[in-house]
Amino acid sequence: MAEKVGYVVKVAGPLVIAKDVPNAKMYEMVYVSDLKLFGEIIEVKGNLSSIQVYEDTSLIGPNEPVYATGLPLSVELGPGLIGSIYDGVQRPLDELMAHYGSFVERGVSLPSLNREKLFHFIPKVTVGKEVVGGDVIGTVQETTIVEHRILVPPNIKGKITKIAKEGDYTVEEIIAVVNDGQKETELKMFHKWPVRFPRPVKNRVPPDEPLITGQRVIDTFFPVAKGGTACIPGPFGSGKTVVQHQLSKWADADIIVFIGCGERGNEMTDVLIEFPELKDPKTGRPLMERTVLIANTSNMPVAAREASVFTGITIAEYYRDMGYNVALMADSTSRWAEAMREMSGRLEEMPGEEGYPAYLASRISSFYERAGKVFILGFQDKVSSLSVVGAVSPPGGDLSDPVVQSTLRTVRVFWSLDASLAYARHFPAIQWLRSYSLYAEQLKDYYEKNAGPNFIDYRTRALAILRKEAELQEMVRLVGIDALSPQDRLTLEIAKSIREDFLQQDAFDPEDTYASLKKQYRMIKLIFLFADYAKDALEKNVDLNKIITLPVRVDISRAKLIPEKNLEAFDKLEEKVKKSFDDLLSEVAHV
């Protein structure tokens, strides 16, 4: 155990001021009092050290001992992460509950990774092999879905002088020895990494492939790239958590890391109950077999909330370094920012806008900038990605909130949620007039190649029609719909079809909950096929009411229910649209 090196002089909630901590360093881990409350040094002034404690500090007073570790706040990275549920500082909540019951006492802790469980290790290198940080020395089948690749830690290189035979080992057993010519380093199946320091990569590359989510409003209108960043701001009840659940289930990622940062306990309970029951659509196995959950609810100590996002993204970087595409969901970064504001106030720092610390923007950036598409470390040139999606909960849905604005300066995709859409049962409730994606142009070639020709043109045209609809609705409110020309009324009908038949999705319908890129392309193409025939018919003096009451419109509205394995049905639908207008024009010509 760490040596007694200082003593408490002041306690202010989660903030403890300690005196005479020799060689105190920023972000060093310490234990406060004989209860061994876990904390981190966040400020050093002379011989005074400010410590944010990740547990309840009730009844802790002056002159109590402080124990130092000399190590930064770190996480354990190795087999056993997948399927686990951690708090903000990587304490295993499911293990703690099994040992101590539903309420975790102060000062109790267990290893983040199970020290007794045996994992079947298969070596991938031989004695004499030169290795560098990031190289795979062996594999473990962590779950049915995930092969865990045991990596050489980033700061180690040399020649393998010993490698364990294939067999069952615990994470603490030595499985390899590396000699760099000066000293030998023993490698276990896990290693530690400080959460506030990004794991190194060879170099970063521009994202050029979308993170396919199966949500049409996202994939077609406002796509996020693999290795990209996105934020979902929205008021209470607008569906932020629902969108993130859909992304967790359907996103084209190998590993999901879900951080519940300061959310209400009942919301996090829903996540913990639902996730183990969700089936991974790619494999049919439970989704938890490729998911790591970090639960730090609003009633947990506020300081741990600040650490939870860094804990989560470090775990995500670890799986990225194995060569997996990882998606991280943070819900919600507003609660994280509130934790920073509370700690900043207790440190008596000069407040910035709305009381948030002056370094709010740089701290948010330091989180999102760890996303990216990268060449990972190791002798092999391999590319993988880490995508980050953060929910923001501004008070009253105010998008001028400092957390929202600081986030928007960093991320490249903005999905603006609208409570009025959610109350109208339009999900996902992403407002198409306020949202944007700065990846759309970068991904153009991918969409043209993998979705269909003119995909981007359809997207541009659809957005233009929705913007035109907003203008026309203003006119309708002023002078009524009868004052509009037939062309403008047709525009309103096509916009309605885009909204209700394309953008609106039913998460509980097995055919509508997910739409592949090819299905999205066929759906939007079908709507515009009708629009083009309708416009042509109008120019030939066909009555608008006859056009918009064609029975084929019902078939267009039901196209979202066409199964993925039966996309040829769209060919028949397109023929039906053409025949409907041929019959209509023929009928008009005979009148």
Image (cartoon, grey):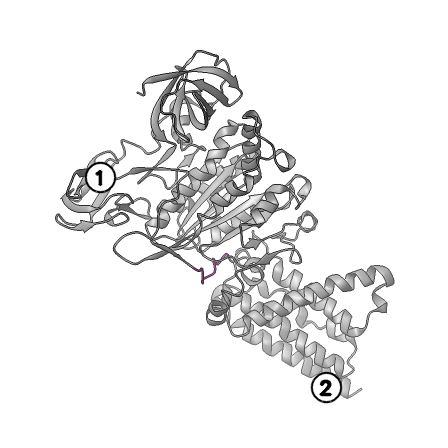
Question: Considering depth in this image, is 49 or 265 the residue closer to the camera?
Answer: 49
Query: What is the spatial separation of the Cα atoms under label 2 and label 1, in whole angstroms?
Result: 80 Å
Q: Residues within 10 Å of mark 2 (few under 14, many from 20)?
A: few
What x and y, as percent, mark residue 290?
A: 39, 46
Q: Amino acid at mark 1?
A: Leu
Look at mark 2 in the image and give the residue it sits on.
586
Asked if labels 1 and 2 touch by Cβ distance under 8 angstroms, the answer is: no
Relative to 393, does residue 588 appear above or below in the rendering? below
Q: Earlier in the sequence, mark 2 or mark 1?
A: 1
> Which quadrant, please, contains the C terminus?
bottom right
Relative to 540, does residue 562 appear above or below in the rendering? above
Q: Residue at x 56, y 37 (%)?
A: 337
SS assignment at label 2: helix
Q: Locate residue 475 relative to residue 281 in the image: left or right.
A: right
- Label for residue 187? 1
What x and y, as percent, mark residue 364?
A: 52, 43
Q: Based on the picture, tell me whether residue 356 belongs to the magenta stretch.
A: no
> Which quadrant, please, contains the N terminus?
top left
Q: Locate residue 150 relative to residue 345 in the image: left or right.
A: left
